[in-house]
Image (cartoon, rainbow, N blue to C red):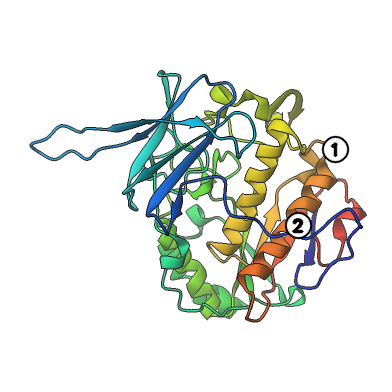
Amino acid sequence: MTLSASMQKPATQSKSRLSVPLDGYWFGPQRHAATGQTTFGLYAPNAHHVSLVLDGSSGADSQRVDVQVAMTADASRPAGWFSATVAQVEPGQSYGFVIDDELRVPDPASRWQPDDVHCGSVVVASADAYPWHCPDWQGRPFEEAVIMEVHVGTATPEGTFAALQQKLDYYADLGVTALELMPLADFPGPYNWGYDGVLPFAPDSAYGTPDDLRALIDAAHQRGLMMYLDVVYNHFGPEGNYMYGYAAKLFKRRKKTPWGDGLQLGRDGAGQVLRRMFIENACYWLCDYRFDGLRLDAVHALDPAVQVDFLTDLALTVRATVAQQSAGGSPRHVHLMLENDFNQASLLSPGLY
């Protein structure tokens, strides 16, 4: 069952909770405009040392030369976090991390994996660089939602964001007012329903580029269509999840879900890190890509000890972050929906979930 509530109006909050916007991203490459430098970070509590590798380019007459930079423990982050700040990193730069001089891994918060989940991560341009045609889109109230669930890979013969964009008029003519895309998080290989994703920030390269996805969303908004995204915060897929090798504390091997090990989503240690990762991910899709809402997959599979606390934390942070982004303009209609086989009425707070 899918539950839903609009997030435009404030929710009644307990005195112990505050709606606080996200204070920037921890995960993924972060460019510092003032210095032109870029910081890379990785949570790797099982590692003794971690290196950042910036892949060099190779031409017909030259051998590729990679640059390796030692990462250091970051005291501003939870224990086990390594970071490195480097200069002159431009969009298109391929990179990865090397754990204890042995295992090379992609960035678990990679924004782009053009060669699939086992290969190099790629730095992308800031979302602000995209030339939105509908920058003042406010969305629509949820009572206007007529939702069509869409799998990008099967909706058109081409199976791409660009091809789906050409089909938007068809959906609008049907009377649909919202497209809900099945999960896009990068998965191994070219075909998947989306529920085996392992890199939650990277739209799967089988469907196109990050800007292809932005163009699809922008075109939908020009037609009055909302865009929702199905996200999975209850498990990682079985292939391409390298975090087991360097951050095993993120997983609860004794608490299984139907799809694999459970996840640590508490407020301390590894739980704090993974909770932050998923909350950042929700804000990322809504703010950097301007999706109009999220559908949270199978929240009944979350650890019941932290389920409501995590979901409330996510909802409050998302709501505050979206409001901060639209400060000075009209507030956006942003909707959170969730699948919950237990039908918990507490997860229907208006303006929250």
Give the labeled residue for mark 2: 315
Look at label 2 and name its amino acid.
Answer: Ala
Closer to the camera in the image, 315 or 20: 20
Question: Where residue 3 sits in the image (x, y, percent)?
Answer: 81, 58
Q: Is residue 287 left or right of residue 61?
A: right
Give the labeled residue for mark 1: 304
Q: Is residue 334 left or right of residue 87?
A: right
Q: Secondary structure at mark 2?
A: helix
Tell me if residue 258 can be seen: no
Residue at 59% x, 26% y is 247
Look at label 1 and name its amino acid.
Answer: Pro
Q: Is residue 256 left or right of residue 97?
A: right
Label 1 CA crowd tier, 10 Å (few <14, some 14–19, many 20+): few
Q: Is residue 300 left or right of residue 212?
A: right
The disc label shown at residue 292, or none? none
Residue at 41% x, 64% y is 162
Residue at 37% x, 54% y is 36
Mark 2 vs mark 1, foreground winner is 2
Question: Where residue 266 sits in the image (x, y, percent)?
Answer: 77, 37
